[in-house]
Image (cartoon, rainbow, N blue to C red):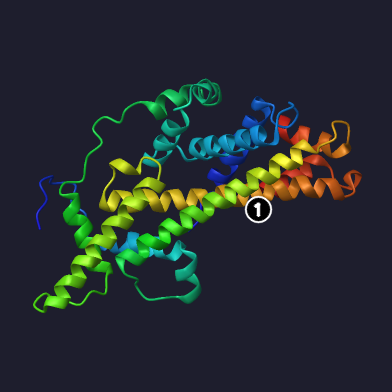
Amino acid sequence: MSSRGSSSRITDEEINELVSKLQSLLPESRRRNIGRASASKLLKETCSYIKSLHRDVDDLSDRLSALMATMDANSPQADIIRSLLRS
Amino acid sequence: MQATKSFERAFLRQLLRVFRLSAVSYKSMSLQERKSAIKLSADVAMASARGSRKWTRGLIAKLSEEDEHRSFLRLILGTEYERLTKPCHGSWKIPRSKKIVRRSLRVCSRRKNNLRAPHGFKSSVLARTLVEKRTHALKRLVPGGESLDGYSLLDEALDYVISLRAQADLMQKLLTTFEASKLSALSKCTLPERKASFVGK
């Protein structure tokens, strides 16, 4: 299989390494320590994981928002937070 | 695999800076507005901390779609904004990317080489369609992924996932710190100490 661009050929080894790295990140693969998964499984789990991380960030944004809203402007903890934000 | 310490520091620094600039901690706004501001801040901080990647450009481009966000982004990122939104010249497209996708599929799938039998042929066609469908799904999830194929897409997805994880972890730590400051005896712990122990983790 030859590629037209001479310097941009990607080796099997590079692909293997990339797939391994990706798989090692995915929670399900980590838990069960599956041997190499199929391409479709890899893609499906990557999509699921990204979506779950998006949900996490969304939830954390909710909680940070609620926390900032309840900050009494004159409380000691408001001072701490303001200092953190200032520096 | 983890995000680097310098990414974590850059993210936190940017996040706190953006919080300050958007006055999100004291300006009066609705819960939803504040949440949107926080989410926007977190995404900008993440892209800024990572630097120039396909997905960071894709993310900034997506966030810039709204006019009100665009001027805010310019303010936050300064010259970095121009750099990240500049069209990428000479970005080499992987030649025959479809062949590379197929090659990587052969490498990682457990498909039996059974092309002679009719049912074998059918299942391999189904497998290919499923992979195509899921590849499209991944393209939509990774910012800037629509223009990527095969190796590039997986490469960007990997980097994006690592950064997303760090983003979530650090936001959690920030939340914990803020919540802890409500409960702990504030006089016992000086501020620089608290901040240093937070960033060093």
Task: Give the answer, above or below, for where B137 lies relative to A67.
Answer: below
| Residue in the image at 53% along x and 35% along y | B44
What is the crowding at mark 1: few (fewer than 14 residues within 10 Å), some, or many (at least 20)? Answer: few
Total tally of numbered discs in the picture: 1
Chain for disc number 1: B
Is residue A32 visible in the rendered structure shown here? Answer: yes
Name the image quarter holding the C terminus of chain A.
Answer: top right
Task: Give the answer, above or below, for where A44 lies relative to B84.
Answer: below
Where on the picture, by quarter, is residue B124?
bottom left
In terms of depth relative to the viewer, which is nearer, B41 or B34? B34
- Left or right: B44 with respect to B183? left
Residue B91 coordinates in the image, percent (x, y):
26, 36
| Residue in the image at 49% along x and 48% along y | B163
Residue A27 coordinates in the image, percent (x, y):
50, 66
Where on the picture, by quarter, is residue A42?
bottom left
Task: Give the answer, above or below, for where B73 lies relative to B112.
Answer: above
Residue A31 coordinates in the image, percent (x, y):
50, 73
Q: Amino acid at mark 1?
A: Lys
| Residue in the image at 55% along x and 23% along y | B72
Name the image quarter holding the N terminus of chain A.
Answer: bottom left
Task: Give the answer, above or below, for where B181 lies relative to B116.
Answer: above
Is residue B155 visible in the rendered structure shown here? Answer: no
| Residue in the image at 29% along x and 64% along y | A16
- Mark 1 falls on what kind of element? loop
- Left or right: B57 with respect to B33? left
In the rendered image, which residue does mark 1 sit on? B201
